[in-house]
Image (cartoon, rainbow, N blue to C red):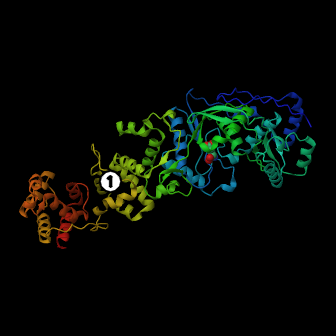
């Protein structure tokens, strides 16, 4: 057995590791070369070939290359929108590249159709990739393939190279053998894992390895770690700031027994070859960072910059809790089905990502969110809180700022999928629907009736005879004969040609006629002198026309409904008294 003297210069935690591969003492070169050949006899490409095939990108110096690297395990998680949006902003704000890489190395966890769902869902949130896995299979870009399951030959080039340089070795332990090691570690109260004396296949004689290989036994490829857990290092994460990490001493698996890489190895190879400059990912990966640093160093790769994003939290009682898969509002499909507006969710995510976003939005109500100067420095280091009330507020503001045309198009697209009957009504007369949606829009203080698309039908349903129903009754305390007469007088006198001033004077005249104050000031000064006020008279008419106590501006409502509907509804209401 050769004596192993790996000169693995202790891992540097600088984020600009020298672009050169570490060396191994020449005494072992022959052993390693031989090992590499017997493990990967079919790999003929070299690291150099890979470097040439995937050269550094030709981008301006500050341009950032970022990626979203989901595992297609079912659905897009609300929490996934955070790192995705951060990556998208960093790339697009700097003139860089934002790519999609599908991490489909775990076939057990894969779900049929998940990839399509993912690409479609992200697209509906305006998250569009410049490069990467394309919907329906295939690739868009020259740094692919962008599905890890198709990159096996590439990983093997680097795996072979690591073996050749003494940084990786095969391990033939069976599950039972690993369990036995674990049991022994427990008995000895030693830390679990494959390291030190427990790393039983480290430095194995080549003959023993050859024997196993010729018996057709499967192996995993392990990293040969020289880390010392006594050593702490400082690492600068762009979101978390300076964090202290402990060197890794575990001989972690790089390739599984089917030759497919683990996340760690694929992360290093892919992010290097795809020339990622900034890795934005969940903070659950922070604990693997020491290993990743080691791995990049052994591979001779420049370490990317890292942004570890805190998990999304929710309030439970008074305490914050991590959002779990089962929580309501986690699966993005839930938002879609419940009528949440993608633009509003984007807006909400931006408010959570940068503390100064809301201030900017107030000062720039009409600007697209892309104009906001997104800054890593303004990101919160602790977990963001999912606050549905806040989301509702943001949604109302977002929809209030949209044009009627945009609302019409969006709500129609949504209704076609979730409220077919309503979609039919909207399509029947688009101009009519847009006139309704135009009410109270565009001014300084736009109406904020709609938070989700499911609000639209109840909000504007009374404009359609098919949906009109009396939802609110006129409160008790008024003389039914008065109500009847007022309604009949209004029906008889309503003139759709009148402007809003003339229209309201008409209502005031009816109020005076039946002893209801037309002058609100006079009414407030001496309410008992009147049966009520013009506000009550307006309310009778409102309930008659809309079936509700609250509605948008009645003059505009009547203009849109048209004289026939107005008069017939008012008369029908009069008939109930
Ligand atoms: N596939 C990993 C995940 O879904 C990606 C993490 C990363 O962005 O590197 O968590």
Residue 61's x, y, as percent? 57, 26
Which of 513/283 is in front?
Answer: 283
- Quarter assignment of residue 264: top right
What residue is at 67 percent from the left and 41 percent from the top? Answer: 288
What residue would you read off at disc 1? 449
Q: Residue furthest bottom?
A: 576
- Ligand 1 quadrant? top right
Q: Can residue 428 be spotted in the picture? A: no
- Relative to residue 157, is residue 498 depicted above or below? below
Specify whether 83 is left or right of 530: right
User: The C terminus appears in which quarter of the rendering?
Assistant: bottom left
Q: Residues within 10 Å of mark 1 (few under 14, many from 20)?
A: some
Q: Is residue 423 above or below residue 123?
A: below
Q: Is residue 74 left or right of residue 172?
A: left
Q: Nearer the viewer, residue 259 or 241?
A: 241
Q: Nearer the viewer, residue 394 or 422?
A: 394
| In the image, the residue with mark 1 has its CB under 8 Å from the nearest atom of ligand 1 | no
**Residue at x 66%, y 28% (from the top left corner):** 14
| Rendered location of residue 371, percent (x, y) | 43, 35
Quadrant of the drawing holding the N terminus? top right
Q: How many marks?
A: 1
* Residue 228 falls in image quadrant: top right
In the image, residue 68 lies at what x, y percent?
Answer: 58, 43
The percent coordinates of residue 149 (x first, y second) are 69, 48
User: Can residue 528 be seen at all in this image of the molecule?
Assistant: yes
Front residue of 523/158: it is: 523
Mark 1 falls on what kind of element?
A: loop
């Amino acid at each position: 057995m050769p004596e192993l003297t790996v000169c693995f210069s202790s891992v540097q935690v600088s984020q600009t590791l020298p672009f050169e591969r570490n060396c191994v003492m020449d005494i072992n070169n022959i052993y390693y070369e031989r090992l590499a050949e017997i493990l990967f006899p079919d790999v003929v490409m070299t690291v150099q070939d890979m470097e040439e095939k995937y050269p550094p990108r030709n981008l301006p110096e500050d341009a950032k290359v970022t990626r979203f690297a989901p595992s297609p395990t079912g659905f897009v998680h609300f929490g996934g929108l955070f790192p995705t949006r951060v990556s998208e902003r960093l790339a697009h704000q700097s003139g860089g590249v934002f790519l999609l890489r599908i991490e489909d190395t775990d076939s057990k966890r894969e779900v049929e159709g998940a990839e399509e769902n993912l690409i479609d869902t992200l697209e509906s949130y305006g998250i569009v990739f410049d490069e990467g896995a394309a919907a329906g299979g295939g690739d868009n870009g020259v740094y692919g393939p962008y599905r890890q399951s198709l990159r096996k030959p590439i990983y093997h080039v680097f795996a072979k190279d690591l073996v050749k340089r003494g940084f990786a070795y095969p391990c033939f332990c069976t599950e039972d053998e690993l369990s036995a090691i674990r049991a022994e570690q427990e008995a000895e109260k030693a830390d679990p894992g494959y390291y030190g004396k427990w790393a039983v296949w480290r430095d194995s004689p080549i003959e023993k390895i050859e024997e196993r290989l010729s018996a057709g036994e499967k192996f995993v490829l392990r990293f040969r770690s020289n880390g010392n857990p006594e050593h702490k290092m400082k690492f600068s994460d762009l979101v978390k700031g300076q964090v202290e990490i402990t060197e890794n001493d575990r001989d972690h698996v790089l390739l599984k027994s089917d030759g497919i890489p683990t996340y760690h190895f694929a992360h290093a190879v892919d992010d290097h070859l795809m020339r990622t400059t900034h890795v934005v990912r969940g903070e659950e990966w922070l604990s693997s960072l020491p290993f990743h640093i080691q791995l990049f160093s052994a591979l001779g790769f420049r370490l990317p910059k890292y942004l570890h994003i805190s998990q999304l939290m929710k309030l439970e009682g008074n305490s914050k809790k991590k959002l779990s898969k089962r929580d309501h509002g986690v699966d993005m499909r839930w938002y879609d089905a419940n009528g949440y507006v993608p633009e509003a969710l984007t807006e909400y995510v931006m408010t959570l990502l940068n503390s100064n976003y809301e201030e900017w939005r107030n000062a720039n109500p009409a600007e697209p969110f892309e104009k906001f100067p997104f800054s890593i420095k303004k990101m919160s280091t602790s977990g963001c809180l999912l606050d549905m009330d806040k989301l509702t507020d943001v949604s109302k503001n977002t929809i209030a700022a949209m044009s009627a045309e945009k609302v019409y198009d969006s709500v129609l697209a949504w209704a076609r999928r979730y409220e077919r009957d309503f979609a039919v009504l909207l399509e029947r007369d688009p101009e009519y629907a847009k006139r309704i949606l135009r009410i109270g829009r565009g001014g300084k203080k736009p109406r904020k009736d709609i938070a989700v698309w499911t609000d639209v039908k109840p909000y504007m349903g009374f404009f359609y005879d098919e949906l009109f129903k009396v939802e609110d009754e006129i409160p008790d305390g008024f003389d039914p004969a008065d109500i009847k007469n007022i309604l009949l007088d209004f029906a008889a006198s309503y003139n759709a040609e009148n402007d809003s001033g003339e229209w309201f004077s008409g209502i005031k005249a009816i109020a005076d006629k039946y002893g209801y104050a037309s002058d609100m000031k006079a009414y407030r000064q001496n309410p008992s002198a009147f049966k009520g006020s013009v506000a009550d008279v307006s309310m009778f008419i409102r309930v008659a026309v809309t079936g509700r106590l609250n509605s948008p501006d009645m003059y505009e409502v009547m203009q849109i409904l048209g004289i026939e509907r107005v008069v017939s509804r008012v008369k029908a209401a009069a008939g109930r008294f």
